[in-house]
Image: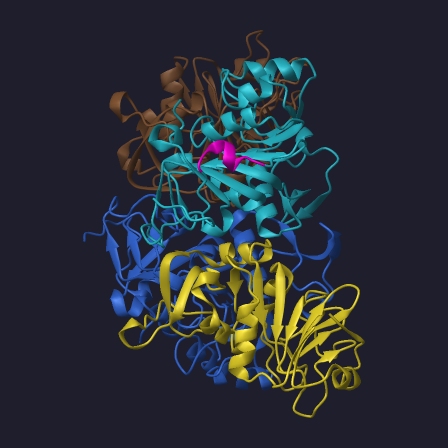
Chain colours: A yellow, B blue, C brown, D cyan
């Protein structure tokens, strides 16, 4: 277990996720915050980015004249195409996801349970418009499901929980959780803390209702 | 180009949408605005069919296209994966007011149900959504070591899609991520209508690169480059 | 019911099948004898030929320098490509067949039953090597299944039968049967003779164990 | 071209086939000789793995390729749709002698079971073969007004396929009807080995026309134009 003195800021969190992606991986970065990981990937990692709307070899965000309304990421933001890119239709794209061909996906989360259940599509509030997109397909499909989130909600309650109270996205699917104060490996045996950032293991253990071990 | 009587090329979007009946299930391509058949959706509003079930990844953006169709009260039910967007206020309001029904389907299951409808697959088991509220009540089975859910085909009466180019016999090619749902929706509907930027002679498209073979295309409307690229 | 004085020869049978294919149809001609139908299609019929091994827009047999080992029909004979052709892989090709998109397929048969059951893949003999290919997919997939066969086996027994004795290819799937002496429409109500060739209706009715009506 | 350590391009077919174990299920592309990975099958014979299950549309032609593998006694079982051909005497003899097991699968079901294995579909219902001896004992259900049969995925340990060209990141394009089973088999195996006529730099292939994305391709062997086109 690595111990660091400072909490991770947004950039630091994205960089930490990026650093741990194995060389040569095919990776999906979902929508929203995880898409920031792309900027911290080292070209030497030779990561190929997949976007659910039908592309492998997605490049950085498009700007100015490079913006093409026919070329977007899953968040509908304009992106670019790298040499070696390939386009395919939606059934083929999700066959790739569901079939277990992506090495890593990075997702945001409302909650993750101690056994790796993921809740990230619906708060369950009566007035909320539910929307799931490709989250359930990524959760069950990628070889490694990485969650990137703040460890505590605004009210201070932990988001790594014994059982999710929000509606589930997938069962026992999360492998790694990256937060601003600690990173976790979720295994069948235990939730292992792999690194801490500005918070001692003892304090973590006290604030979480989930039993943790130092990894 | 010449358009003989048997040609699939229609003179207008209105002509291409003739005959769509009230109560139809309409598959509408696009992922956000990429691949959205804007001209055809506008023509559907003009055409007047109502009590529609709309199958599309999203539930309308801003005040045009699908959002305008919803605002006009023509839609009974939306089947989609991601209705909630920063500019989906029309759907949001109708949904909260109980004026439109929503069937929320995980995106990959949506694509695969459309494929199944086109491919003659009666039903399939998928691990997506197993154990979640979106598959409550569905038949489940443990297969390949994990819980899977039985899902059924999602056929359409009509598909409205956008492609880049068509040839005279209806073969289609797309542009970049605007391809998305077009090819599966074309296979899943009894009648498929496509808007394209241009129609080229048979033999002009590389036979190795055709994404939607003409067998799946019934009517073609040429809307020009800008409209075909999802711009207004 | 048309009545013709002469039996159909091989060419005449293929021509009769070709003549009845509706204008603008997408058609699969299977393997073996039905492939001869292609030569009798009128260009004005604008028929597009499908071959199960991944092509729409198949042209005539290839000869001489036009022979390309990468371009064959379902019988593995070299063929050509017409303008407007498209290639696709096997799962897509059979999705097209199974999904009901082909207007017509033409198949050979060992037996057809009065209710349209088809037997054309296996004689059931103990020493026979069974082989099915795409026959079962065509039988259940095409909008109209047309059988082209001789009406009587070498021993004189009819091949249009009350119940197939050979292993089935598909249930209640045959719509039309073309033979050298008569053509039949198989409907839920009756087997209807639509034309005779050199054999009187009365003789047909006597030699078949299947009740027939003149259509 | 240069081949860095991480390159998928192998120096020889022998290198590409290293590690195939006895008892493996090997998916072999091709429809007759079109798309048949002749160089890879020859290398498999050299490599020596035995007790194999071979999944392929046919069961070998003449005395070379799959027929030679069968003749060498390496094949326990053949899963195919059409073993009986005018030149399938090797298979015919072994089958009649009870020396090779046959699982006969309708061609479309073979293709769809391979697709299901690659697409994470746990099982599917298909009308193909319902009520025939080939689906005896299978689970059936009436769906969409007709009898359908439940079929399971058909995954491979290894796929051996032939394509026309690869780029450096493994994207593949095919030639004409030699495409056939290659794309689905590439998705269905843990390790996919492809023989191609040439490897071109990344970016040389049209991204709109790629049939098999590189994610499905593990090892590439350049065999030159003639071998890639199924000629001996």
Count of numbered circles on the image = 0
Furthest residue toward bottom: A155
- Is residue D14 covered in magenta? yes
Furthest residue toward top: C155
- Is residue C98 covered in magenta? no
Q: Could you say which quadrant of the image residue B105 lies in?
A: bottom right
x, y percentage for residue D144? Answer: 62, 50
Front-most of residues D95 and A130? D95
Front-most of residues A74 and D140? A74
x, y percentage for residue A168? Answer: 70, 72
- Could you tell me if residue D181 is visible in this image? yes
x, y percentage for residue B87? Answer: 46, 83
Tell me which segment is drawn in magenta. D11-18
- Could you tell me if residue D82 is visible in this image? no
Q: Residue at x 51, y 51 (%)?
A: B118
Q: Residue at x 42, y 49 (%)?
A: D4
Q: Residue at x 46, y 64 (%)?
A: A53
Q: Could you say which quadrant of the image residue A204 lies in?
A: bottom right
Front-most of residues B70 and B103? B103
Residue C148 vertical placement versus D120 (above, below): above
Residue C163 vertical placement versus A127 (above, below): above
Query: Where is the C terminus of chain B found, in terms of image quarters?
Result: bottom left
Residue D102 vertical placement versus B32 (above, below): above
Front-most of residues B2 and A73? A73
């Amino acid at each position: 277990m690595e111990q660091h003195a400072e909490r991770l800021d947004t950039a630091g969190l994205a960089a930490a996720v990026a650093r741990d992606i194995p060389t040569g991986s095919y990776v999906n970065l979902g929508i929203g915050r995880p898409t920031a990981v792309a900027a911290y990937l080292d070209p030497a990692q030779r990561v190929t980015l997949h976007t659910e709307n039908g592309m492998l070899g997605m490049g950085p965000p498009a700007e100015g004249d490079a913006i093409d309304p026919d070329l977007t990421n899953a968040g509908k933001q304009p992106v670019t195409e790298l040499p070696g890119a390939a386009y395919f239709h939606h059934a083929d794209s999700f066959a790739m996801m569901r079939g277990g061909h992506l090495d890593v996906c990075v997702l945001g989360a409302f909650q993750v349970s101690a056994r790796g259940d993921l809740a990230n599509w619906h708060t369950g509030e009566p007035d909320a418009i539910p929307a799931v997109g490709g989250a359930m397909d990524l959760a069950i499909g990628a070889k490694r499901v990485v969650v990137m989130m703040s460890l505590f909600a605004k009210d201070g309650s932990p988001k790594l929980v014994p059982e999710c109270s929000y509606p589930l996205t997938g069962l026992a699917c999360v492998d790694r959780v990256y937060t601003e104060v600690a990173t976790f490996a979720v295994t069948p045996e235990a939730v292992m803390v792999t690194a801490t950032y500005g918070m001692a293991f003892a304090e973590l253990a006290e604030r979480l209702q989930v039993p943790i071990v130092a990894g | 180009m010449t358009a003989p009587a048997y040609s699939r090329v229609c003179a207008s979007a209105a002509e291409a949408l003739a005959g769509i009946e009230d109560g139809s299930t309409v598959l509408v391509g696009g992922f956000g605005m990429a691949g959205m058949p804007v001209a055809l959706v506008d023509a559907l509003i003009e055409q007047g069919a109502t009590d529609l079930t709309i199958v599309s990844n999203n539930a309308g953006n801003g005040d045009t296209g699908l959002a305008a169709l919803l605002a006009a009260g023509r839609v009974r039910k939306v089947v989609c994966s991601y209705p909630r967007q920063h500019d989906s206020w029309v759907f949001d309001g109708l949904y909260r007011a109980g004026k439109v029904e929503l069937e929320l389907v995980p995106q990959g299951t949506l694509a695969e149900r459309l494929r199944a409808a086109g491919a003659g697959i009666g039903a399939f088991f998928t691990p997506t959504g197993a154990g979640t509220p979106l598959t409550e009540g569905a038949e489940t089975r443990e297969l390949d070591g994990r819980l899977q859910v039985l899902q059924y085909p999602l056929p359409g009466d009509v598909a409205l899609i956008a492609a880049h180019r068509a040839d005279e016999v209806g073969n289609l090619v797309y542009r970049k991520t605007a391809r998305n749902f077009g090819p599966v929706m074309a296979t899943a509907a009894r009648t498929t209508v496509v808007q394209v930027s241009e129609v080229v002679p048979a033999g002009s498209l590389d036979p190795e690169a055709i994404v939607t073979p003409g067998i799946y295309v019934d009517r073609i409307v040429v809307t020009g480059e800008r409209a075909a690229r999802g711009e207004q």
